[in-house]
Image (tube, rainbow, N blue to C red):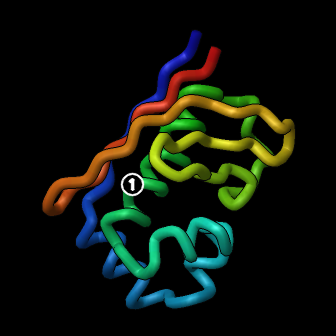
């Protein structure tokens, strides 16, 4: 079992989105993730944290994987789908105020 965690400062992500715009969003998030977040920077930050947590949990296995190949899916209980392998990982997302956090468990 491997675990990864990450925390994101929401205002920093908001600044990146403002400065880099749609090109940045399309490079990091899938269309489904963008639709699910409906413009909520807090929700985007939680998904960014999940992607980073996946990379921390799986490390070298993801060296050539694009961030859009790591997708947070699901209504209610979120999951992470790795589009390169079809693997599905458990993830816990949370955001409060200026911070968003994610924890990923890979078995």
- Compared to 35, does 22 lie above or below? below
Mark 1 lies on residue: 46
Q: Residues within 10 Å of mark 1 (few under 14, many from 20)?
A: many
Q: Residue furthest right?
A: 85
Q: Write the residue at 62% across / 86% down.
A: 23
Q: Write the residue at 64% across / 27% down.
A: 58
Which of the 4 quarters of the picture holds residue 22?
A: bottom right
* Image quarter (top left, top right, bottom left or bottom right) of the N terminus: top right
Give the tally of numbered discs: 1
- Compared to 70, does 62 lie above or below? above
Left or right for 5, reference 56: left
- Measured as percent of width and height from the top left, residue 95 is found at 25, 53
The residue nearer to you, when weighing 74 against 64, is 74
- Measured as percent of width and height from the top left, residue 3 is found at 49, 21
Question: Label 1's element?
Answer: helix
Which of the 4 quarters of the picture holds residue 12?
A: bottom left
Q: Write the residue at 38% across / 44% down.
A: 93
Left or right for 28, reference 45: right
- Measured as percent of width and height from the top left, residue 105 is found at 53, 23
- Measured as percent of width and height from the top left, residue 28 is found at 60, 67
Q: Write the residue at 81% across / 48% down.
A: 83
* Image quarter (top left, top right, bottom left or bottom right) of the C terminus: top right
Which of the 4 quarters of the picture holds residue 60?
A: top right
The residue nearer to you, when weighing 49 against 64, is 49
- Compared to 58, does 41 lie above or below? below
Left or right for 76, reference 33: left
């Amino acid at each position: 079992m491997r675990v990864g965690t990450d925390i994101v400062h929401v205002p920093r992500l908001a600044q990146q989105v403002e400065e880099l715009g749609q090109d940045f969003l399309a490079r990091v998030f899938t269309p489904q993730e963008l639709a699910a977040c409906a413009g909520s920077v807090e929700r985007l930050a939680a998904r960014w944290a999940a992607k980073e947590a996946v990379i921390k949990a799986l490390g070298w296995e993801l060296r050539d994987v694009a961030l859009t190949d790591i997708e947070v899916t699901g209504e209610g209980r979120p999951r992470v789908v790795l589009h390169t392998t079809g693997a599905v990982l458990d993830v816990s997302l949370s955001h409060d105020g200026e911070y968003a956090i994610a924890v990923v468990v890979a078995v």
